[in-house]
Amino acid sequence: MRIRTVALAAAAVPFAVAAAAVVLEAGHWRLYAERHRIELKPQPRRSCPDCRGAGGWWVDGANPEMEACGCWSNRPELRIRLLPVPAWPDEPPF
C-alpha cells in the first residue's frame, strides 16, 4: 500500500508541473522562481489586434520611445516573498 501511495505521489508532481505550465501559457504569464521570491509577470498576447504580440509600439517624435500595449501593461504583477534577502555588508571584505 505504501509503495502505491509513493508511486501515485511521484506521478502527480510532473502532472501538476505540466498543468501549471499550460495554465501560465494560456493566461500569458511568465513564472520566475528563486529561493527569495516567486514572481508571475504578464506577457503580451499574440492575438492582440493592437501590438500583435510585440508588447507595444514606437512613438515618433523628437524623443522616440516605446509605448506599452494595454494587453499586458495594465495587468498586475504578482510577487510572493519566500526568504529574506541577506543584507550586504557596509565594508569591503578585505
Image (cartoon, grey):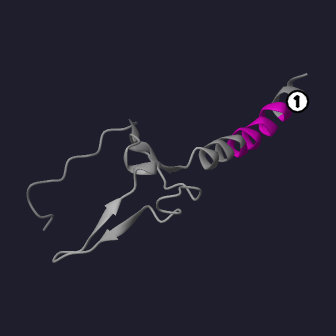
Element type at marker 1? helix
**Residue 34 shows up from this direction:** no
As drawn, the residue found furthest toward the bottom would be 62
- Given residues 5 and 78, the one toward you in this image is 78
Foreground: 26 or 84?
26
Q: Quadrant of residue 85?
A: top left
Where's the C terminus, which quadrant?
bottom left
Q: Residue at left 41%, top 42%? A: 75
Number of numbered discs: 1
Residue 92 x %, y %: 11, 64
Dominant SS type (magenta): helix
- Name the residue furthest left: 91
- Please tell me how crowded label 1 is: few (under 14), some (14-19), or many (20+) other residues with Cα within 10 Å: few
Q: Can residue 91 be seen from the camera position used here?
A: yes
Residue at 88% in and 30% down: 3
Type of amino acid at the residue the image marks with label 1:
Ile
Q: Residue at x 15, y 64 (%)?
A: 93
Position of residue 35 measured from the top left corner of the image (x, y, whole percent): 43, 45
Screen quadrant of the N terminus: top right
Q: Nearer the viewer, residue 74 or 93?
A: 74
Side of 92 relative to 69 (left or right): left
Q: Is 55 positioned to the left or the right of 88 in the image?
A: right
Identify the residue shown where x is 60% and y is 45%.
24
In magenta, the rendered stretch is 7-18
Q: Is residue 25 above or below residue 9?
A: below
Q: Disc 1 marks which residue?
A: 3
Q: Is 74 rendered above or below residue 1?
A: below
Residue 68, given in percent of the width and then of the height, sits at 35, 58
Residue 8 colored in magenta in the image: yes
Residue 74 lies within the magenta run: no
Is 58 located above or below residue 88 in the figure?
Answer: below
